[in-house]
């Protein structure tokens, strides 16, 4: 018997576990839009919540093994507050950079949630912002911001000094239409989720276009409003294919490898919530017999991150959880 | 442009939609009445709300769980959906096919139901009844989920006949009997809901309709004089073909779009206000094989709809007041924070959207107004119409200045303001009071920067006074 790997034979991807549940405070997330991975498996989850529940607007700090650490931030326009929080990134000394696409500013916090400073001004000029949507920080300390309604990427120092920009409105090579997520690979190449063009674009750090991956659709290698992108040490590209409710995995040359559509098994925090609600345990059990998929699948996954331990972490927006996958070199029997 | 054309177009856009800014009214008037009616009736030819953007900036709108979020989303659509008649029909059916969050306790299901009305509200009435009867929210709201082969619950069967299709009676006669109610309820046994995931820990799953043949009473039934092993589909077939149903739908359309009818419980004994109008729509109903769009086409092209006698003769519902005002003043015409507060305003004015008081819906017409709701309406309207920073108000002020290079007399100033918020006719006494107020400021000059500033202030003040008139409460 022969086995066909179609050129991909040294990696497998398996579901590992789930972190979180829908919650307005404490051990859970509410309409999370982005997250960042810190040292020691710490995760910072940025919760947008919604207008009539501003109490859910916050950053939840926990670990990938679902230990709750703390939360900080709140709804509003003052220092350290968020209106439309959109993106989070970890910088030097594990300081946290958080974009707000209504206030058009970047706020900086210590890893313990202490407000440090903020900067940003609405506009279209150099260094001005119109709905910053995605953040990525290079090892050299350059902050890349997808400036979505200006259809460009801007570069800043970590204290907000303008360094440069690339991209303009359009659907040609290197042009952008409301970009959202952004990531860097180990070589320093920049990957942008070109949201309304339904593709990922690759640039040099200086902004020179290198490649475009994907097109509109729901098939293999096609996207419907990609929101988040991450690149691992092998150069594999992970794309949160938001309105297709999946994450696609592409090789570094853009070839489709596989996709995740969600495999949730209830998290510990989820169990904790249900333990005090036996009626819901019963209801859930009966529902599972009718539909096994609902509970497992992604709903509008909007961000994906990877770490150096082979974790691929997917932010499952509507369900308020992180689904964690594991990349492995070994063959895994599932 | 002819003032009569503007006035007629403004009337059409208030009734077939949620009103419009003066710029939009003039653009549509230039396009022509007939063409605008066709555009309203065929929404699929126009772009809709950009849902990807809406989900991006309001991500909770995807599978929205909270009732407040669903109401927000709907109010946003009322203000911004370019397919305005589609949105008005969603409100129309919500006010007839009443189901409410107070019992359903799932904001998401209410949102799903409104979306169904939006997408199918201008289609075939029989198909709409089928969608309604298989809407999980309605199945639950009217207890069909508790109606079993061995223990029938008559609630849905009764309301389907009384409130959703034929009505109690017409031309003095009763349309159906108690036995028909029982047979109808039996026909719908087994029309139920599949088990759904609970809210914790990851959110509810959308409810799904499920037919359970083992719980369906398949025995012989007599319904409206026809005998057979009827199920729900058979009942809907028979209901759609009834003259009483055509009458019922036509009177509702007339009541909503043209002029207030007597309350529904009186329809058996009180004939329609305009029997020919109703007859014309009944004919369209049968000629088109139950197509709501065909009835609307007759209505909007009729002389009874265009008549000056019916303009500003209906009290605006709170939803019309709020969405219409936002459209006029140009507020929340883009996705931005603050829509939650706006979406709660209809409730403060007596219309808790997605949560009607009973299955019979709201008491409409002059019953929208009491001392409390009137204050809410006036305050809300005055607050926005007096804000000359809002783009729609600013545009009206600019138009008023541009209407005459010379200073405006107090009468010209008042008439200009009334024209721009309507065109609105007010009672002579009201007009006199407005002019008296304007006279205190003398002529309205707008040559120098200081004069322009004062002109703008006075215009905002005059718009606020107009918002407080009785006439402004009407659509």
Image (cartoon, coloured by chain):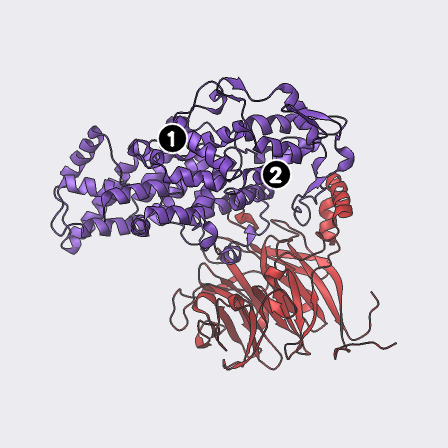
Marks 2 and 1, how far apart at CA: 29 Å
Number of numbered discs on residues: 2
Tell which of A276 and B340 is nearer to you. B340
Colour applied to chain A = red
In the picture, which quadrant includes the C terminus of chain B?
top left
Side (left or right) of B292 relative to A277 = left
Residue carrying label 1: B259
Query: Residue A215 bears which disc, if any?
Result: none
The one nearer the camera, B125 or B287, is: B287
Q: Quadrant of residue A296?
A: bottom right
**For the residue labelled by badge 2, is the local secondary structure a helix, a strand or a loop?**
helix
Measuring 68% from the left and 24% from the top, which residue is drawn there? B222
Secondary element at image label 1: loop
In front of the other: B193 or A287: B193
Q: Chain of mark 1?
A: B
- Residue A148's place in the image compared with B264, above or below, is below
Task: Return the chain for callout 2.
Answer: B
Residue A164: give x, y in percent of width and height: 44, 78
Q: Which chain is purple?
A: B
Residue A22 x, y percent position in the rendering: 64, 50
């Amino acid at each position: 018997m022969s086995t066909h790997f179609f050129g991909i034979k040294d990696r497998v991807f398996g579901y590992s576990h789930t972190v979180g549940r829908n919650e307005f405070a404490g051990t859970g997330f509410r309409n999370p839009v982005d997250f960042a991975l810190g040292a020691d498996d710490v995760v910072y989850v940025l919760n947008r919540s919604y207008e009539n529940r501003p109490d859910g607007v916050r950053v939840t700090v926990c670990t990938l093994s679902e230990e709750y650490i703390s939360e900080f931030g709140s709804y509003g326009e003052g220092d350290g507050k968020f209106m439309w929080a959109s993106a989070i990134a970890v910088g030097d000394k594990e300081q946290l950079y958080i974009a707000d696409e209504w206030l058009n500013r970047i706020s900086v916090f210590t890893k313990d949630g202490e407000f440090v400073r903020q900067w940003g001004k609405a506009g279209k000029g150099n260094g001005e912002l119109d709905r910053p949507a995605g953040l990525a920080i290079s090892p050299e300390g350059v902050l890349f911001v997808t400036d979505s309604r200006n259809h460009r990427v801007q570069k800043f120092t970590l204290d907000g000094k303008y360094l440069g920009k690339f991209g303009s409105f359009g659907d040609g090579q290197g042009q952008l239409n409301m970009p959202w997520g952004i990531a860097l690979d180990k070589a320093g190449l920049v990957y942008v989720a070109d949201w309304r063009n339904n593709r990922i674009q690759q640039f040099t750090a200086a902004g020179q276009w290198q490649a475009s991956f994907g097109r509109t659709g729901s098939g293999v290698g096609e996207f419907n409003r990609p929101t988040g992108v991450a690149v691992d040490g092998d150069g594999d590209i992970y794309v949160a294919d938001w309105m297709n409710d999946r994450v696609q995995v592409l090789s570094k040359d853009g070839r489709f490898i596989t996709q995740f559509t969600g495999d949730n098994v209830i998290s510990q925090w989820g169990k904790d919530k249900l333990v005090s609600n036996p009626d819901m345990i019963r209801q859930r059990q009966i529902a599972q017999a009718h539909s096994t998929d609902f509970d497992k699948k992604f709903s509008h996954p909007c961000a994906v991150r990877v770490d150096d331990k082979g974790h691929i972490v997917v932010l499952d927006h509507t369900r308020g959880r992180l689904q964690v996958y594991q990349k492995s070199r070994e063959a895994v029997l599932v | 442009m002819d003032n009569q054309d503007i006035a007629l177009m403004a009337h059409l856009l208030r009734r077939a939609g949620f009103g419009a800014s003066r710029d939009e009214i003039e653009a549509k008037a230039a396009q022509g009445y007939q063409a605008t009616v066709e555009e309203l009736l065929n929404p699929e030819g126009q772009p809709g709300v950009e849902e990807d953007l809406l989900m991006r900036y309001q991500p909770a709108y995807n599978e929205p769980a909270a009732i407040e979020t669903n109401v927000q989303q709907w109010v946003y659509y009322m203000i911004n959906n370019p397919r305005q008649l589609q949105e008005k029909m969603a409100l129309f059916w919500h006010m007839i096919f009443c189901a409410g969050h107070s019992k359903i306790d799932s904001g998401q299901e209410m949102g799903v139901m409104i979306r169904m009305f939006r997408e199918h509200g201008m289609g075939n009435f029989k198909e709409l009844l089928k969608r309604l009867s298989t809407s999980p929210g309605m199945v639950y709201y009217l207890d069909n989920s508790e109606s079993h082969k061995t223990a029938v619950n008559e609630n849905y069967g009764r309301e389907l006949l009384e409130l959703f299709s034929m009505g109690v009676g017409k031309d003095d006669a009763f349309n159906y009997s108690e036995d028909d109610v029982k047979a109808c309820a039996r026909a719908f046994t087994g029309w139920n809901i599949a088990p759904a995931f609970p809210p914790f820990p990851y959110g509810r799953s959308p409810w799904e309709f499920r037919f359970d043949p083992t719980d369906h009473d398949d025995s012989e039934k007599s319904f409206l004089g026809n005998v057979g092993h009827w199920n729900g589909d058979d009942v809907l077939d028979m209901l759609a073909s009834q003259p009483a149903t055509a009458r019922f739908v036509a009177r509702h359309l007339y009541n909503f779009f043209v002029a207030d009818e007597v309350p529904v419980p009186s329809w058996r004994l009180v004939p329609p206000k305009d029997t020919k109008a109703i007859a014309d729509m009944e004919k369209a109903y049968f000629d088109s094989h139950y197509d709501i769009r065909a009835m609307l086409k007759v209505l909007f092209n009729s002389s009874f709809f265009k008549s000056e006698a019916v303009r500003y003769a209906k009290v605006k519902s709170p939803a019309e007041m709020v969405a219409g005002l936002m459209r006029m003043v140009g507020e929340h015409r883009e996705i931005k924070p603050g829509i939650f507060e706006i979406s709660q305003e209809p409730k403060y004015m007596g219309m808790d959207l997605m949560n009607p008081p009973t299955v019979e819906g709201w008491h409409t017409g002059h019953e929208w107004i009491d001392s409390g709701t009137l204050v809410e309406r006036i305050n809300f309207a005055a607050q926005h119409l007096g804000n000359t920073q809002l783009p729609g108000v600013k545009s009206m002020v600019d138009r008023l200045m541009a209407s005459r290079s010379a200073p405006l007399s107090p009468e010209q100033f008042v008439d200009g303001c009334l024209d721009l918020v309507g065109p609105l006719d007010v009672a002579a006494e009201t007009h006199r009071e407005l002019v008296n107020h304007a006279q205190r400021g003398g002529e309205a000059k707008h040559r120098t920067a200081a004069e322009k500033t004062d002109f703008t202030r006075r215009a905002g003040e005059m718009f606020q006074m107009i918002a407080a008139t009785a006439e402004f409460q009407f659509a």
